[in-house]
Image (cartoon, helix red, strand yellow):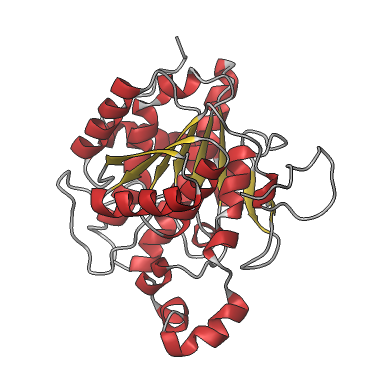
C-alpha cells in the first residue's frame, strides 16, 4: 500500500488507487475474484483494510488469489465462497453462507463475466449460459443479499459492464433470452448481457431512491484491459491477445491494475453518486471518470420489463418497498 493519503475533495489530477480511502471495518464481496480484474479489485480493497470475500466458481483458484494478496498485505482478512452464477442453486447456497457469517455487506461488486462461444446450449436452469452468468446470477445474488446491503450505513452495489453494451447491434430481446429463435452470435449475446447489467444497476438505483435507502447502485466498465478474458473474445480482441501481438496490443489496451480503477472508484470514491457510470477517460483506456451510458441503457420501460422477467426467471423477488 502506498503511504500517500487519499486526495482531498476537489483535488486535481487523475484518480488512482492511492485515492482509495481507508476501508477498515467494511465487508466487500467480489464475484469472479479468482483472476483478472476481479482479483485486482479484491487486492486493492483488502490493501485498504476491507474484509474481502472472494466469490468464485473455483475455490482453489480463489484461495490461490487470496494467498497472493496476503503476501502483499499480511493482515488482510480474506475468505473464499464458492458460487457458480450459472446455477441458481449455487447462487442461493452462496448467499445463505454469507448470511450465516455477516449481518451486513457494505460492498457488492458484481464483477464476474464470461462469454460462451460454443452455444447455443442451456444451463441446468434452462438459460443461455452467458446471459445466466453475467446477468441473471448477479440479479439473484444481489436480491438475496439486499437486506444485508441495506443494513450497511453507506452500502454500494457496483455492476461491471462493458463497451459492448453500447454497440449499435446490441439489442435486448426479452422474448428470446435463450436464443431459440435467433442465430446465436456469441459477441451479440455478450453485449446483451452487459446491457442488462446497466439496465439492472440503474433500475435498482431508481427503486432504492424511491425507497429512501442509503444503499446506492453504480456501474463501471474497465475499457480494454490486458487480461485473459480477451482470449475468449472473437475477432480483433482475440487476435491482439496472441503473444506475438503483445507489442501492438499494449498500444490499445491497459494493464489489469488500470482496468480495475473504474470499478474501484465506483466502489470507494465518496464523490460518486447512485446511478453514476464510471469508465476510462479515453476510448479504450485511461483514468476513471464519469461517462454517459448508451441511451438504451437508460430506457426505463425496458429496465422495468427486464426486472420483471428477471424476477420471474430466477424466482428472486426483491422486497420493494423496503421493510
Q: Position of residue 180 (x, y in %)?
A: 22, 57
Residue lying furthest bottom: 244
Q: Residue at x 48, y 17 (%)?
A: 151
In x, y percent, where is residue 179?
A: 27, 58
Q: How many marks?
A: 0
Query: Where residue 104 sits: x, y (%)?
Result: 44, 21
Query: Depth check: 229 or 161 in front?
Result: 229
| In-image side of 140 versus 252 (left or right) | left
What quarter of the picture does the C terminus occupy? top left
State which quadrant residue 118 falls in.
bottom left
Closer to the camera, 207 or 93?
93
- Residue 23 coordinates in the image, percent (x, y): 58, 33
Residue 127 to residue 222: above or below? above
- In this rendering, does residue 292 appear at all? no
Position of 31 with respect to 25 (left or right) is left
Please tell me which residue is depicted at 66% across the width and 37% down the height of the picture. Answer: 21
Foreground pick, 144 / 226 = 226
Name the outermost residue toward the left. 124
The residue located at (32%, 54%) in the rendering is 64
Q: Give the camera-side residue of 103 and 194.
A: 103
Along the horizontal axis of the image, is 124 left or right of 238? Answer: left
The answer to whether one can see residue 126 in this image is yes
| Residue drawn at the location 50% of the way across and 31% of the way down | 204
Amino acid at each position: 500500500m502506498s503511504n500517500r493519503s487519499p486526495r482531498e475533495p476537489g483535488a486535481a489530477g487523475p484518480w488512482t488507487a492511492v485515492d482509495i480511502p481507508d476501508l477498515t471495518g467494511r465487508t466487500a464481496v467480489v464475484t469472479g475474484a479468482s483472476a483478472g480484474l476481479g482479483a485486482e479489485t479484491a487486492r486493492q480493497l483488502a490493501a485498504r483494510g476491507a474484509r474481502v470475500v472472494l466469490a468464485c466458481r473455483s475455490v482453489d483458484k480463489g484461495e490461490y488469489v487470496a494467498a497472493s494478496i496476503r503476501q502483499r498485505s499480511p493482515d488482510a482478512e480474506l475468505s473464499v465462497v464458492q458460487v457458480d452464477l450459472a446455477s441458481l442453486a449455487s447462487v442461493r447456497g452462496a448467499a445463505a453462507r454469507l448470511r450465516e457469517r455477516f449481518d451486513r455487506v457494505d460492498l457488492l461488486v458484481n464483477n464476474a463475466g464470461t462469454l460462451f462461444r460454443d452455444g447455443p446450449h442451456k444451463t441446468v436452469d434452462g438459460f443461455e449460459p452467458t446471459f445466466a452468468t453475467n446477468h441473471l446470477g448477479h440479479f439473484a445474488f444481489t436480491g438475496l443479499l439486499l437486506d444485508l446491503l441495506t443494513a450497511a450505513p453507506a452500502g454500494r452495489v457496483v455492476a461491471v459492464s462493458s463497451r459492448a453494451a453500447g454497440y449499435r447491434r446490441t439489442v435486448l430481446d426479452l422474448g428470446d433470452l435463450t436464443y431459440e429463435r435467433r442465430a446465436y452470435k456469441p459477441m451479440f449475446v455478450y453485449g446483451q448481457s452487459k446491457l442488462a447489467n446497466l439496465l439492472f444497476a440503474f433500475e435498482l438505483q431508481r427503486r432504492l431512491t424511491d425507497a429512501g435507502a442509503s444503499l446506492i447502485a453504480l456501474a463501471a466498465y474497465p475499457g480494454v484491459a490486458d487480461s485473459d478474458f480477451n482470449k475468449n473474445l472473437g475477432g480483433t480482441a482475440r487476435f491482439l491477445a496472441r503473444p506475438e501481438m503483445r507489442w501492438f496490443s499494449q498500444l490499445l489496451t491497459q494493464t489489469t491494475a488500470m482496468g480495475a480503477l473504474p470499478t474501484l472508484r465506483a466502489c470507494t470514491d465518496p464523490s460518486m453518486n447512485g446511478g453514476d457510470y464510471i469508465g476510462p477517460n479515453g476510448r479504450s483506456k485511461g483514468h476513471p471518470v464519469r461517462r454517459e451510458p448508451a441511451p438504451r441503457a437508460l430506457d426505463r420501460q425496458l429496465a422495468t420489463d427486464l426486472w420483471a422477467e428477471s424476477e420471474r426467471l430466477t424466482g428472486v423477488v426483491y422486497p420493494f418497498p423496503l421493510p
